[in-house]
Amino acid sequence: MKLLSLHCDYIKYEAVKKALKNASLEVGQEGKHEIKEPLVILTAVEKGDSLATVKPYVDNIKDIAGQVKAKKIVLYPYAHLSSNLASPEIAVEILREAEKQLKKDFDVTRAPFGYYKEFELKCKGHPLAELSREISLEDRKVEVLRTNKGKELVVEENYNPEQLLRQISRTKLDTSKLKDNDHRIIGQQLDLWSFNEVAPGMVFWHDKGLVIYNELANFWREEHKKAEFQEISTPQILDKKLWQISGHWDKYKENIFLTKYEGRDFAVKPMNCPGGMLVYKTSPKSYKDLPLRVAELGIVHRQELSGVLAGLFRVIRITQDDAHIFCADENQIEGEVCRIIEMINYFYDKFNLEFDHVELSTRPEKRIGTDKQWDIAESILENVLKKLKMKYKINNGDGAFYGPKIDFHAKDSQGRTWQLSTIQLDFAMPERFDLTYTDKDNKEKRPIMLHRVVYGALERFIGVLTEHLNGNFPLWLSPNQVKILTLTDRNIEFAEIVYEKLKEEGIRVELDKRTETMDKKVRDAQLHKFNYMITIGDKEEEANTIAVRKRGLNEKPKFGIKLEDFISQIKEEIRERK
């Protein structure tokens, strides 16, 4: 069984039509429903589940409800969380029994089973608002064999090498429900990345996809160096103690990958912040060291149900372009927030992404810190937005539990909005980790810190950018920069000379010397979205020139171009990241 719990301000739903022939609405399930302040439990009942699954299912719901202090429960059948579903009869029986048991302590609503439903909900913004869990009662049967040396060897029953090989073979992409510009389709067409069930929610970067990833990382590093950030890298597996101090152990344990080493509990980091705190603490700090800007392209892992994974948009292995800025006082914070916004605007201008709107999220009901700290923090962020004359919306109560935040929602070429960059103001983490600095008066004081991402998750940003550009990456970012096309076999030798010269200049170039028509070669190069196509025939070889066509169906080739001039032009284009 898989479940996704959502602590919501409200949920509205209505059964629209039958998804199963034998489905029928039960008493009270007809018409439109609206439940306020519910804990919504999206549930997929899987093969192997039975009435014995009800107890751990109910116990998990009670545990989550107790943590978020929810009194209303909505049991919502949601098949999309799994591809290994149980029979409808078993699923309904389990949900009915769970409803019966939960009604002893909660106000319970069970949504219709076997129906397509329209629904709308607003999820709260606190750390426990969205949690995924998996319940399994199946224990694999094992057989213990003795080797001829007396050692025990545990072998799983039904071990079948051929079956396992089929399971780990490349997972096929089902494109039937995807739009043509879906980044998963473009990624397959351009050989950028792939996904496999052996590593759910984790990207297999192919050579060309890694070009995009690395170019974005290089651009990020250059700009952060200019902005006087120190780049760090922290371990991916850290002791349980660290996560208890940070609060993640209590609040996110169900979403953390856990492991053990020499009897100690460790966690695969879900966030980069605690590692950054330890770097700060390695040496004494004075007011002269602040503001201290520390950045990390850190890899984190968070458990997610397979049903909510969506290509690059929602992954388990995440590259976050985190930065933590330690400030001495409120004046420094305001200046640093202005600098961050300037950087965010610069980055998104580079990709022709506009911001649809900006949100200032204020104190949630469940929070840490004093009201005075929250007053100061909210005032600082709002003053910056006003000072910069930025249009913004107030998102009351949706701040992080440790401080308010500014979220930037970018609009892509299809009119969709994406929350990518964010700035969070935090009084709590420096206190939890006992961070200090020595002030001018030689007294120890507590720094205030900013959390910040520009790309957000690098994987998600690449997915958004791919669809925004429909795979037509700018030259500096493109894995397919130049394609050389030969008109006849006679021209291959000259084409190879051109190819080697471009390659020596660091240009990503490919040579198509197949015995095919020029129309087919051009069409293939356009399908693979090469920025430039160089055509070489007898005339070009005799004149020691090249014919150049830019990407685009309506672009016409330009003849008589000197290779040196072409190299100079595109190197400038790459250098300027146009």
Image (cartoon, rainbow, N blue to C red):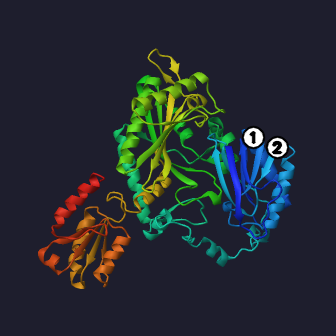
Is residue 344 or residue 146 the one in the foreground? Answer: 344
State the residue position of label 1. 70
Q: Amino acid at mark 1?
A: Ala
15 up-or-down from 161: above or below: above
Q: Secondary structure at mark 2?
A: loop
**93 in relation to 385, above or below:** below
**Residue closest to the eye, 574 or 422:** 422
Residue 545 in which image quadrant: bottom left
Quadrant of image for the N terminus: bottom right
Q: Is residue 265 visible in this depiction of the protein?
A: no
* SS for callout 1: loop
Which residue does the numbered mark 2 point to in the structure image? 106
Image x and y of residue 167, in percent: 63, 72
User: Do labels 2 and 1 touch, CB within 8 Å?
Assistant: yes
To which quarter of the image does residue 189 belong?
bottom left
Horizontal side of 95 relative to 296 (left or right) equals right
Q: Residues within 10 Å of mark 2 (few under 14, many from 20)?
A: some
Answer with mark 2 or mark 1, whichever residue precedes in sequence.
1
Looking at this view, name the residue that lies furthest to the front. Answer: 31
Which amino acid lies under the numbered mark 2 shown in the image of this protein? Phe
Residue 184, horizontal then vertical, whole percent:
50, 65
Q: Position of residue 265 (x, y in %)?
A: 68, 46
Residue 268, how many percent across, how many down? 61, 49
Task: Identify the residue at image location x=71%, y=42%.
Answer: 36
